[in-house]
Amino acid sequence: MEERLQKVMARAGIGSRRACEKLIEDGFVLVNGQRAHLGMKVDPQRDRIVVQGEPLQGAEDFVYIALYKPRGVISSVTSPDPRPTVRDLVDIPGRLYPVGRLDVESEGLILLTNDGALANRLTHPRYGHEKEYHVLVARQPDARQLAAWRHGVVLKDGYRTRPAKVRLLRKQGKGAWLQLILREGRKRQIREMGRMTGLPVVRILRVRIGNLKLGNLKPRQWRYLTPAEVAALKSGSKGKST
């Protein structure tokens, strides 16, 4: 089935449609050995598409990997400094992009894939996929502080976070571990929620994205997703709270 070239490229994880159009305009895309042009339609099962010297992977070549990102590793494919990236931890060839980023101080589950359509589904706010975290805070929370997290916290920039699910997992010294489930992911949101409610965040561990769980993975370890896990993510299921 023929589709517009930029749509096929975007679905394969190359970038947004506008970014793909720019690559085509700049002459970085070949179709069956010929320079591509805007408006061109292709059949990804029949035509050979090369982007910046690399063959475009079709649906049958999609890769899905669960990785335990440790602290100190950047959630990106390139790094502006000597710190390692999540891509450095997965030693297989081809294009892979992180889905569900974590800041450099945080750790836990990240999905790496070249499936652009699934990446968009997992990150677009309208789908509301749950992300579950275990969060260590420096103080033991009271009912008022937990209620603020549940009803939404007004951040420094004036944004009110969406209601979250939160409960006490266990106390640890003067602090406590919380289970937190969000359906949004603003930059450094959890740390800001803690700061605004008097609960400084010490550690963040993501344990679930939708149906996909961190499981027994250890820091720096990764594994391929099972077909059932991929199907569950694509079905749009939000996952069950515990």
Image: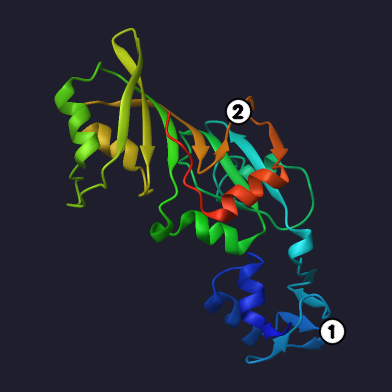
Compared with 122, 205 (above or below) is: above
Which label is found at residue 22? none
Nearest the camera: 48 or 72?
A: 48
Q: Is mark 2 on a helix, strand or loop?
A: loop
Q: Residue at x 71, y 58 (%)?
A: 95
Amino acid on which the number 2 mark rests in the picture: Gly
Residue at (71% x, 79% y) in the render: 28
- In the rendered image, the vertical position of residue 166 relative to residue 21, given as above or below: above
Tag 1 residue? 32
Front residue of this view, candidates 133 and 72 = 133
Q: Which residue lies furthest to the top in this view?
A: 173
The CA distance from mark 2 to mark 1 is 43 Å
Q: Give the mark toward the camera: 2 or 1.
A: 2
> Which quadrant, please, contains the C terminus?
top left
Q: Position of residue 112 (x, y in %)?
A: 63, 48
Local SS, label 1:
loop
Q: Mark 2 points at which residue?
A: 215
